[in-house]
Image (cartoon, grey):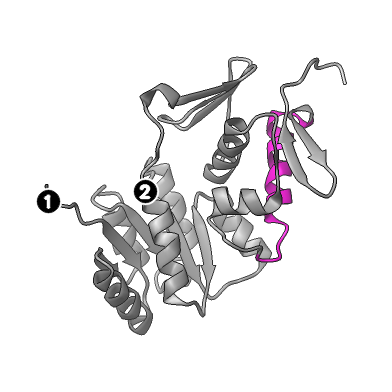
Amino acid sequence: MEKTISRILIIEDEDRISSFVAKGLKSSGFQPTIADTGREGGYLAQTGDFELIILDLGLPDEDGFSVLKRIRNAQVATPVIILTARSSIDDTVAGLENGADDYMAKPFRFEELLARVRLRLRPQANGADTRILRVGTLELDLGSRRAKLEGREIDLSAREFSLAEAFMRNAGQVLSREQLLSRVWGYDFDPGSNVVDVYVRYLRNKLGAEWFTTVRGMGYRLDEPTDHTD
């Protein structure tokens, strides 16, 4: 059987960087395509021909965040890795909140980028019987990427959805910050940010604080609330 080659879209205006990334991806068995403007990249991203997108924020014609927003508004679920010189926690959170799947700051090591790419392209081991996760009155539809609480649809960002999925697959178990960084963000190390705590707070605000228990010195646990009178 012929092996399918994953196509990767690189939206980056610096020729030195885009050529370096494309060359590395090609030698690793991928098929890269380069777009050097947000307009071209946004158009190509919506064709549905790519398995992953690497997106720079500092594009010549528009901010990468607007490209990302346009892609997600068009219901394109292709994984997006942001690659940018901006490295503040505010930019990181903004990128993830706007629908990115990962965030890497320049300068970067290609080996780390390649590991992130492979992680995002890794096929899910779940069969069709696990396309809907349920814990009590909380439900996640993995196909449509919709969340419901007590039958009411809850609007979750891509990152919030992935974090909720990690908790629901391990309901009743304590997950450390390191485990969550690995499963949701793809980090094999703690980058020293409080991004996990920030996103747990987002979920508490949207789903209810009673769903998430803080286990001091260990991490967080998802528990089905016994009542809603607290």
| Tag 2 secondary structure | loop
Look at discs 1 and 2 and give the one toward the viewer.
1
Q: Hey, which quadrant is residue 5 in on the image?
A: bottom left
Q: Is residue 10 magenta?
A: no
Label 1 – label 2 distance at C-alpha: 23 Å
Q: Position of residue 3 (x, y in %)?
A: 17, 52
Whether pointer 1 and pointer 2 mark residues with C-beta atoms closer than 8 Å, the reply is no
Please give the name of the residue rendered at 37% of the width and 72% of the height, measured from the top-left corner.
12
First to last magenta residue range: 191-209
> As drawn, is 141 to the left or to the right of 224?
left
Residue furthest to the bottom: 16
Please give the name of the residue rendered at 73% of the width and 49% of the height, measured from the top-left corner.
197
Q: Is residue 47 above or below residue 173?
A: below
Q: Position of residue 57 (x, y in %)?
A: 48, 67
**Predominant secondary structure, magenta span:** helix
Q: Which residue in the protein does label 2 denote?
A: 78
Residue type at numbered disc 2: Thr
Q: Position of residue 90 (x, y in %)?
A: 67, 62
Q: Is residue 143 above or below residue 46?
A: above
**How many neighbours does mark 2 have within 10 angstroms: few (below 14), some (14-19), or many (20 or more)?**
many
Please give the name of the residue rendered at 70% of the width and 51% of the height, measured from the top-left corner.
177
| Tag 1 secondary structure | loop
> As drawn, is 35 to the left or to the right of 101?
left
- Which quadrant is the C terminus positioned in? top right
Q: Earlier in the sequence, mark 1 or mark 2?
A: 1
